[in-house]
Image (cartoon, grey):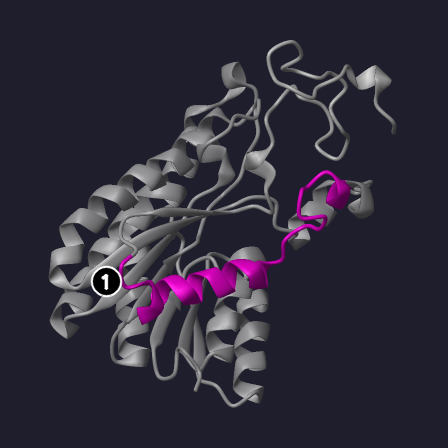
Amino acid sequence: MKRMENKRVLVTGSDTGIGRGVALEFAREGAVVCLHYPHQPEGAATAVDEIRRAGGKAEAFRADFNDVTQAQQLVKDAVDFMGGIDVLINNAGITMNMPFEKVTLQQFDLLYNVNIRAMFFVSQAVVPCMLKQGSGAIINMTSGHSFSGMTEHTVYAGTKAAVVAFTRVLALEMAPRGVRVNAIAPGWILVENHLKVMKDLDLKAAARSIPSGFIGQPADIGRLAIFLASDEARYIIGQTMIIDGGQLSVMPNTGDFLQSREHQWGQGYVPGLEPRDNCPP
């Protein structure tokens, strides 16, 4: 039996990248899916067509998340189409890198409006429906940027760290009322935009830099989201699940994780240790 059979799912920012992949995975598991796109409909439309051709039910709706009223209207449109919402995937977000001193007020406002303010008010609009049903799951998409730093990402990282705190507190308010809230923090997930921006990207070399040995795909995030939305995750509340192929497990400034250590620590006080120079390769 499909795990999401007859579940009604809204995925924001699902015209491309992770959101599109998540929406398709939910549909494969039997969910009715509403996809959201901010401007151009093509990406969401092709996903809807793919779902329908496979025998599923889906629709796409437009909303500019820089405008809260449009974000709230998206929820109404989704409820009208599906008759309710069982799962909300708050995926919509904008990435930007810019040196701190060059960030403009317009750029700052746009990222905070889309990445956190819209998430807040979309969730607020969905919750009454879930409370009326007596159940529901909200999954917020954050990022590895919440836990480790990369230069020129002061704005983006700030919005994603806010998602982690928002998730934790909203989960406390909602759990006693039957709605579970968690977050997903993806590491490097290969999406179309990477190939557009990093035209000289060596995918094989990039894969070797990740402990898993490969770069994640949007479907990997979709499968984790399905688990968190299912009854199998009923005891997981207010958590941020990191899915990054082991990237955050690597300590900085320690060299290539694939290579053996050059130095032998513990000599003189741990039995059986010799300098690494004397050890066979």
Who is closer to the viewer here, 62 or 143? 143
| Local secondary structure at mark 1 | helix
- 42 is higher (above) or lower (below) than 65: below
Q: Is residue 134 above or below residue 228?
A: below
Residue 69 visible in this rendered orientation of the protein: no
| Image coords of residue 86 (percent x, y) | 28, 71
- Magenta residues span 206-235
The crowd level at tag 1 (other Cα within 10 Å; few <14, some 14-19, many 20+) is many
Horizontally, is 236 left or right of 143 in the view?
left
Residue occupied by mark 1: 126
**In-front residue for pair 247/188:** 247
Image x and y of residue 71, in percent = 32, 56
Q: Quadrant of the C terminus?
A: top right
Query: Which residue shows up at 37% across the image and 67% down it?
Result: 10
Q: Quadrant of the N terminus?
A: bottom left
Residue type (three-letter) at the residue carrying disc 1: Val
